[in-house]
Amino acid sequence: MGKILNVGIVGCGGMGGGHAIAIASGTGNAVWNADSADSAAFKGSRNTDISKKLALAGVYDIDPARQKWAAERGFKNYESYEAMLADDNVDIILIATPNHLHKDEAIAAMRAGKHVLCEKPVTPTSAELEEILKVSAETGKVFYPRQNRRWDEDFLIIREIYENNLVGKTFNIESRVHGSRGIPGDWRGKKEYGGGMMLDWGVHLLDRLLYMIPEKIKKVFCSLTHVTNTEVDDGFKMHLTFESGLTAVVEVGTCHFIKLPLWYIAGNHGTAVIYDWSCDGKMVRLKSWEDKDAVPILAGAGLTKTMAPRGDNSVEELPLPSVDFDHNELYSNLADVINEGAKQIVTGEEALRVLKLMEAAFESDRTGTVVNFE
Ligand SMILES: NC(=O)c1ccc[n+]([C@@H]2O[C@H](COP(=O)([O-])OP(=O)(O)OC[C@H]3O[C@@H](n4cnc5c(N)ncnc54)[C@H](O)[C@@H]3O)[C@@H](O)[C@H]2O)c1
């Protein structure tokens, strides 16, 4: 067991405040509104006790209301970012400010001898991340992108299905999130702060997909939506074609009052669906192709054999596989990378590939064309 590493958090808003509670409590649970319906979502099956790896040194936020919030919970408020960087007690700077600030804060932290855990999207552009990675290489300090949604149960179930061909060989994957509140908050709707839903949620969905599918991406086609915001995208629909021919649809929407499923995965021997974050869903698997032909059925104003339902003897409905996971693995891995030189689970290079993919998506939307990617 290595040294317990002290974390200083810059930006103590929604997410930074969550990190402060997660680290100070040692539970890793970032929910600070205990009455929130979402509190039940934190249910890793073997969560590491992070109090043995990380401790909270303090926070820095420019907003007096957030300083008060921190003080009321007994967290130390630094008087400036510089003061936090000058504290020899601080080993890691956790960046949870609006996106446009991440680059300068990360570079200043590494130059001050600190390791960095940086909220997603680590930067609004790939060029900015390249600058950060250069400084990380120069200083030997760890730069860790916080792509925490690799530990979402719904994603881990889909990965289990995909990697083990539980619905046969996958030919299409759909990954989406639908909300109905438009773009929340003050800075997420503005370009200068690195706003927009591609950078906010797209970064999660694309990171998970690229982590799961070890293939080059050949083609990208994307349309952004501007239903509630003209300055930045309030959602998008992206089509990806991988080297093997596998296709994926990735969608983020913020004006959907009926949600489509989080995941829909189609293979040559079955289909799986996950409806929501409670991981309600199912697999329907082919037992036999024998029942290939059907007598025509009446469908709408016409007859069809192609779309006739299958009989129970040729398909079976199965529950989704269960998965074993540690919701605190990212925090824990960060500490192990610093203390023991463990392999970094989320790397800067992976974050760079995702940023470049998002840039290809923006280009596709701008030009209305398919963009060749890798
Ligand atoms: N990984 C996740 O699941 C997840 C979830 C939510 C947010 N985030 C990320 O966390 C970051 C913050 O998002 P949020 O939702 O907490 O936003 P927020 O607006 O709730 O909080 C941002 C905080 O930063 C403070 N701030 C602004 N400028 C500052 C400065 N110069 N120095 C210090 N503090 C400053 C603000 O006062 C505010 O309290 C973003 O990068 C966002 O994408 C990640």
Image: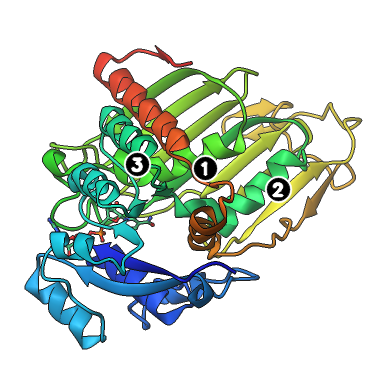
* Percent of width and height locating residue 177: 42, 49
Residue 232 lies left or right of residue 19; in this view the side is left
Question: Pointer 2: residues within 10 angstroms few (<14), some, or many (20+)?
Answer: some
Residue displayed at 66% across by 35% down: 266
Tell me the quarter of the picture where residue 367 sits.
top left
* Percent of width and height locating residue 89: 31, 69
What is the secondary structure assignment of the residue under circle 3? helix
Disc 1 and disc 3 in contact, CB within 8 angstroms: no
Query: Closer to the camera: disc 3 or disc 2?
Result: 3
- Judging from the image, the colouring scheme is rainbow
Say above or below: 266 vs 373.
below
Q: Which residue is mark 3?
A: 139
Residue 220 lies left or right of residue 182; in this view the side is right
Q: Say which amino acid is labelled 3.
A: Thr
Q: Which residue is mark 1?
A: 208
Q: Quadrant of the N terminus?
A: bottom right
Question: Pointer 1: residues within 10 angstroms few (<14), some, or many (20+)?
Answer: many
* Percent of width and height locating residue 339: 52, 59
Say above or below: 200 vs 232.
below
